Image (cartoon, rainbow, N blue to C red):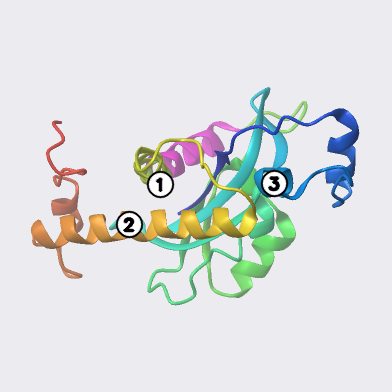
Amino acid sequence: MINASIVPVPRQGITAEEKELVQQQATPADWPPAKRRQKDTNAKWTKKHGKSYFGYKLSASTDKRYKLIRRIVVATASEHDTLHFEAVLDPGNTARDVWADKGYVGQQREARLTGQSWRLHIQRKAQKKCPLSECREGRNRRIAKTRARIEHVFGALEQQGGKVLRSIGLASATLHLNWKVASYNLRRLCFLKTAGVTALTPKWRLRWLKWPPGRKN
């Protein structure tokens, strides 16, 4: 399962002229060294559902059965989700099914991945003056039911230290998010081990397990 989430960072208090220089990957000459260390010149602005965000974007692939994060890519928030679709695919995964939402539709990429034996389950979106058929709407609902599991993973990551990342720079953000993902996977593995889950545990039993531990149904 593949998804991406915006990771906000504190907004930078800079003028319009300084912002223009930063966008050109330059640093204002009048900034003292102390100010340069406190300004994040890597984070970018983006809009989602009509709301503006400043920060980075975490793309991740998650195991459908056990909800373990397999690969991640950290980039600026302005980069499109599809740019890192193939980068987060794990060729070592025993299953070849890929689940994603409407934002990952792309004919050339889908043809290329299908040629590499990936089975794609990507939701379709309606085009102008061409609504989805009842069959495709039903397919979208079936995919959404499975893909919703990755939303639980991103929700658990947000609970680990809040929604805002308080670091400066892309390298620091990448390091912090890798730590957070490693921490999540360790917690998840401990839970699976305590529950007695193995690679041979039937799928019907996994649906009855509680995560996180202590959560009430």
Crowding at dot 1, Cα within 10 Å, few <14 / some 14-19 / many 20+, comes out as many
Say whether residue 27 is magenta. no
Judged by depth in the image, the label closer to the viewer, 1 or 3, is 3
**If you read the primary sequence from the N terminus, does the residue marked by circle 3 or circle 2 appear first?**
3
Secondary structure predominantly adopted by residues drawn in magenta:
helix
Question: Could you classify mark 2 by the number of other residues whose Cα lies within 10 Å: few (under 14), some (14-19), or many (20 or more)?
Answer: some
Give the label on residue 150, or none: 1
Residues at badges 1 and 3 in contact (C-beta under 8 Å)? no
Q: Position of residue 17 (x, y in %)?
A: 91, 33
Q: Residues within 10 Å of mark 3 (few under 14, many from 20)?
A: few
Report whether residue 68 is seen.
no
Which portion, as a residue range, is magenta? 133-145
Q: Amino acid at mark 3?
A: Ala
Residue beneath label 2, please? 183
8, above or below 81, in the image: above
Q: Amino acid under label 1?
A: Ile
> Which residue is identified by label 3?
34
